Image: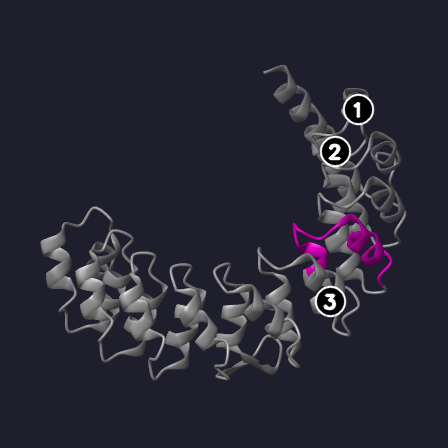
Amino acid sequence: MRDWDKEEGAEDPDTDGEELVSLALDWDWHVRRAVANNPCVPVEILRDLAKDRVQWVREAVAASPGADREILDMLATDDDGFVRAAVALNQKTSPEALAELSYDETMDFDYSLSKNRYIVMEAVAKNPNSPEEVVRTLSEHAEEGVRAAAVANPGVPEDVLSNRKTDLSWSVRRGVARSPTSTADILVHLAQDRIQDVRAAVAANPNTPTSALASLAADRDVEIRTAVAANPSADGETLAILSRDWSWKVRERVAKNPATPEELVRKLAGDPDQSVGKAARARQEADRI
């Protein structure tokens, strides 16, 4: 039977080092995993737990921000794919190890998507420490999940995003639309995408030009108009149009948007919908402070 109190103590940052040493030797692997999850666990304990017989403990070590490169290099060659995937996600993993892991073809079935996914490759593709050439290569992978992970990398090169804006997979194009480094030209192109989720991502991106936001403000989909209404880059004219939208959700987002002019907020404070009026009055109150 699991000892939840012991696990809670093992994860507690305030638990002293001597107690953690004892807990790291506990017979229950749940407790040992909890020690590995402790943000203040000493690296010496992590080094021992990296050799644990239970995969879930080693996976927790691989994901720990306290793991050093020696530990991560060792776990990068672990027999278990989930452990290697955790190493691939860890931002302390060396570029050299990430380059090696980029060839790892371990797959796992994703029940939410009803398909297999390359769990290690996707993790490498997302890691901001991955070398540029690795991200470039993975952005051209045959599997859309790997390409989508690559365009989500915060260090993805601009030309990769430009190339992927016409990807056959809408999930990849959505990733490009979400990227904080996508240029105005890329976002203008994706604002006309046939897939709602892609346009919604463009509508929410603060880098989207005002002209594209104005176009999306007239989109037939209410979720897209709501995203535009919440975008701090939307201009006053677009927000004025959206403040008269039939959907209370859109008008409420206009009221909450810090870019909405005071005059519009004042009008929305008298909106017949209770949620909209409340949001506008809360915004007025915040502006007075």
- Left or right of 126 in this view: 30: left
Location of residue 33 (image quadrant):
bottom left
Residue linked to disc 1: 270
Distance from Cα at disc 1 to Cα at disc 3: 45 Å
| Residue at 82%, 33% in the rendered image | 235
| Residue at 86%, 36% in the rendered image | 238
Q: Amino acid at mark 2?
A: Val
Secondary structure found at label 1 = loop
Could you say which is closer to the camera, residue 98 or residue 142?
A: 98
The answer to the question of whether label 2 and label 3 lie on touching residues, with beta carbons closer than 8 A, is no
- Left or right of 184 in this view: 59: left
Query: Does label 1 or label 2 sit earlier along the sequence?
Result: 1
Residue 208: numbered disc? none
- Left or right of 156 in this view: 34: left
In this rendering, which labeled residue sits more in front, label 2 or label 3?
A: 3
| Residue at 33%, 80% in the rendered image | 78
Query: Does label 2 or label 3 sit earlier along the sequence?
Result: 3
In this rendering, which labeled residue sits more in front, label 1 or label 3?
A: 3
Q: Amino acid at mark 1?
A: Gly
Secondary structure found at label 2 = helix
Residue linked to disc 2: 276
Distance from Cα at disc 1 to Cα at disc 2: 8 Å
Q: Position of residue 180 (x, y in %)?
A: 65, 50
Distance from Cα at disc 2 to Cα at disc 3: 38 Å
Give the quarter of the figure containing the N terminus. Answer: bottom left
Residue linked to disc 3: 164
Q: Which residues are magenta?
A: 176-193
